[in-house]
Structures are given as structure tokens and as C-alpha cells.
Amino acid sequence: MAEPQVTTLRTDPCDPSLALLTVEEAARRLRIGRTTCFRLVLAGEIESVMVGRLRRVPSDAVPAYVAKLRHRPAQAA
């Protein structure tokens, strides 16, 4: 007798069909810490929106932040 197949919901943070990301998913895409990402979001460096009481990052805000970093003048050490 064949075993029934179980389908699971994919929660891949790199899923291009996601319109909004959690701050944790955005942090994973940027390969930075969750706290650092929250700090950037709250400072307005990374765009975010509120959905009810939840803070979400539009998926296109991540590459926009990277582009902003690339065009920022280098800081002296």
C-alpha cells in the first residue's frame, strides 16, 4: 500500500514571489544579523511598512539598500 504524500508549505526566504519579507528574512538575504537589520529598518536605511502590527520589508527594498551602499562614498578607516 502506497504511503500518502504530504505537501508542505514552502517558506524559502529567497522565494522571488514574496512581496513582503519579515525583518529576519531580509536580514538573511543581506547576510547580517537580525538586530542589525532591525536597527537599519528603524533608522529608515531599509524601507519597511506596517501591516497591522507587523513590520514587513518590501522585497525590492533589499536590493535598493545594497545599491545605496554601493553608491555611498567610502569612509576613511
Image: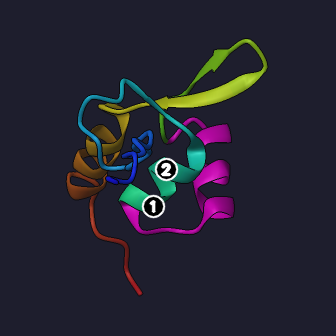
**Rendered position, 55 above or below 53:** below
Q: Residue at x 56, y 39 (%)?
A: 22
Instruction: Describe residue 39's horizontal placement relative to residue 69 as left or right.
Output: right
Decide: few, some or many residues near mark 1? Use Cα within 10 Å; few <14, some 14-19, many ≥20: some
Could you say which is closer to the camera, residue 28 or residue 1? 1
Instruction: Describe residue 54's horizontal placement relative to residue 14 as left or right.
Output: right
**Rendered position, 24 above or below 64:** below
Q: Residue at x 41, y 68 (%)?
A: 31
The answer to which image quadrant residue 54 occupies is top right
Decide: few, some or many residues near mark 2? Use Cα within 10 Å; few <14, some 14-19, many ≥20: many
Q: Is residue 35 magenta?
A: yes
Q: CA distance from mark 2 to mark 1?
A: 5 Å
Can you say which quadrant of the picture contains the N terminus?
Answer: bottom left
Q: Can you identify the residue that label 2 sits on?
A: 25
The magenta segment is 30-45
Instruction: Describe residue 41's horizontal placement relative to residue 25 as left or right.
Output: right
Q: Dots 2 and 1: beta carbons under 8 Å? A: yes
Q: Can you identify the residue that label 1 sits on?
A: 28
Could you say which is closer to the camera, residue 47 or residue 6? 6
Q: Secondary structure at mark 1?
A: helix
